[in-house]
Amino acid sequence: MHQNQLRSPVGHSRPEPRTLRRFGAIMALTMVVAAGWGINSRYQASAALKDVTETAAIPLVGVVSPKVGSNTSDLVLPGTVQAVIDAPIYARTNGYLRSLKVDIGAQVHRGQVLAEIDTPEVNEQLRQAQADLNTAKANQAIAQSTAQRWAGLVATDSVSRQENDEKLADAKAKDALVAAAAANVARLRETQRFNQVIAPFDGIISARKTDVGALINAGSGQGVELFHMVDRSVLRIYVQVPQTYAASVSVGQVAQLKFAQFPGRSFPAKLVRTADAIDPQARTLLVEFQLDNSKGDLLPGSYTEVHFTTPLAAVNQRLPVNALIFRGDGVQVAKLGPDNTAAIVPVILGRDMGTEVEITDGIKPDDKIILNPPDSLLNGQKVRLAAAPAKAG
């Protein structure tokens, strides 16, 4: 009875010491394995992070091959369109505008009456001049008669030669007065005929700047412009060519004109003359094209784009503008070397084509040029290629 009380309760016998040692060894081994796995995992993660960091430090770039430019240049410049004849019409006499025969848009012919002017003052001046002419003729007749009479008297020594010479001179003076009065009458008659405003050439009335009843003064210095006429059968197109292209344009060259009101259509024009001098203000050469406009499709004063092709002395390479590096050493580009390293080289720029630029020196057609090079890119620095090279443009 006493011994049974000293035993453990039924079903809860104490484990053997050997079993406890085995269990402890297993637990220790498990902890060692877990610790080793954790250390190894952290090491592998650290190594992977290092690889990723080192890889990310190498710039990822795209490359492009230079594009061979054309041996001609397509030049597009703005042009100013003018009629071959563009003239203001003024009155040649004073008066009041009596009537208008034409208005804007009228097609008129040379010699056609455009307006009539009432000229009362000129009419009165003509009548007075005619009266002065008659008076001069009467005085001339008396002087001639007197000179003839004195010429007969001097033969008989009835009068002196001095008096005879005076009568002859007076007769000649009266002849001169008659001629002057006749010239004045002729002038006023011509002025009176200017009461009709006549078209000086075939053309179109592009503006009317007066109305019936308006006071008209003769000449462009004092009087207002009555009409404005244009002859648009031939159009002049004036273009300012930059100095860079001045040597490439020549008389006889044909250009194509494009107008906004005629999309998809072009009009050929011929270069007829140049200023043969560079404008010192704009550094451009003024050239004139002419275009046959006998059908009247185009209007003077329009804006046009002048497209003409000029030959180039040398064929250059072209690159996108985002391949250029602008630093203190000048304009540069970054080439991709065979070992994926960047080689930064200087280049000489040619013409700016907008999205592309010409490179006159510094690259070769088989070079691979890095696009969008980072500002921190150094010469000899390692880079990663993002895609296969593509042709510029």
Image: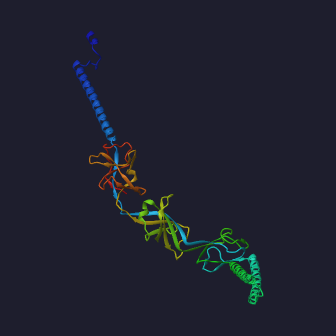
- Which picture quadrant has residue 99? bottom right
| Residue 93, quarter of the rendered image | bottom right
Q: Position of residue 74 (x, y in %)?
A: 41, 63
Farthest-out residue, top: 2
Q: Give the quarter of the figure containing the C terminus.
A: bottom left
Between 244 and 193, the residue placed more toward the observer is: 193
Colour convention: rainbow
- Residue drawn at point x = 48 percent, y = 58 percent: 283
- Horizontal and vertical percent for residue 121? 75, 76
Question: Which quarter of the figure has residue 232?
Answer: bottom right
Location of residue 132 with respect to 327 vertically, above or below: below
Frontmost residue, 351 versus 334: 351
Q: Which residue is at the front of the view, 52 or 87?
A: 87
What x and y, as percent, mark residue 237? 51, 68
The quadrant of the rendering that contains the N terminus is top left
| Residue 105 visible in the shown view | yes
From this view, report whether residue 235 is shown above or below residue 26.
below
216 up-or-down from 385: above or below? below
Q: Is residue 31 left or right of residue 81?
A: left
Report the residue that reaches farthest toward the front.
157
- Image x and y of residue 321, in percent: 40, 53
Q: Nearer the viewer, residue 27 or 67?
A: 67
Q: Is residue 189 left or right of residue 302?
A: right
State whether residue 266 appears in this view.
no
**Is 181 drawn above or below residue 252 in the view shown?**
below
